[in-house]
Image (spheres, grey):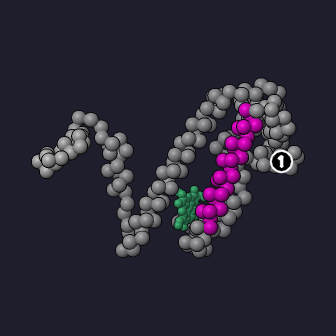
Amino acid sequence: MENDKAAPASWHGAKMDFSQAMSYGDYLALDQILSAQHSRSPNPNEMLFIVQHQTSELWLKLMLHELHAVRAHMHAGDLPPAFKMLAREGFAIDAERLAGDWTVATTANESVKAAWLQVYQEPTRHWALYELAEKLVDLETAFRYWRFKHVTTVERVIGFKAGTGGTAGVSYLRKMLDVVLFPELFSLRTAL
Ligand code: HEM
């Protein structure tokens, strides 16, 4: 400690020269991230608004990243029992649903509902598919909570003004609350 002032570069053994190696800041691109907060008003609270929104955007980015990975595994049949059991254990799924465009919003399909119904009626026989279905229901439930919290926040912050994205704002977001991601998994419960 007696040399603290004489040799600041070696305080506590801290490495100060990263000219030959990647630093923590380089790895996380901190220069870019920490220089991306540009308040446009004199209001000191704007920084909180920007940082909170940027943080939320990063969490959403992570969620999408992980969901894409999950989807790739499922398409590759890496959720072993799941897909092998579904297209090979006798569940009859409509050909047009299987060949459908996965990038557009899904609509309920009776053959899919009938297949999931069999899974729920005999969960121990189709355990992996049952687990998969419940995870998807968890995902949709969490997303619905998020949508509700978001629209409530939006109403609180901008009232009934139109959105910057061009929609009517709150009335549009309220309609979005009725969008169902996995319609068959919810509607089949009525039949259980
Ligand atoms: C004061 C805070 C916020 C306001 C006033 C607001 C406002 C809005 C509005 C009005 C819309 C409808 C689209 C439009 O016309 O702009 C929208 C949609 C959306 N916003 Fe926000 N937003 C806020 C915060 C956030 C945050 C923190 C996130 C997450 C990063 C977010 C993510 C989204 C998403 C994903 C949609 C599409 C919603 C859906 O399809 O249900 N928003 N927002």
Seen from the viewer's position, the closer of residues 127 and 47 is 127
> Whole-percent x and y of residue 127?
76, 32
**In the rendered picture of this protein, how many numbered marks are placed on residues?**
1
Q: Is residue 70 above or below residue 50?
A: above
- State whether residue 67 is above or below residue 56: above
Q: Residue furthest left?
A: 6
Q: Residues within 10 Å of mark 1 (few under 14, many from 20)?
A: few
Left or right placement of residue 159 versus residue 22 in this view? right
Q: Is residue 58 magenta?
A: no
**Residue 182, placed above or below residue 179:** above
**Circle 1 sits on which residue?**
189
Q: Which residues are magenta?
A: 128-152
Query: Is residue 138 located in the magenta-colored stretch of the structure?
Result: yes
Tell me where residue 153 sits by quadrant.
bottom right
Q: Position of residue 11 (x, y in %)?
A: 21, 45
- Amino acid on which disc 1 is placed: Arg
Quadrant holding ligand 1? bottom right
User: Image quadrant of residue 116?
Assistant: top right
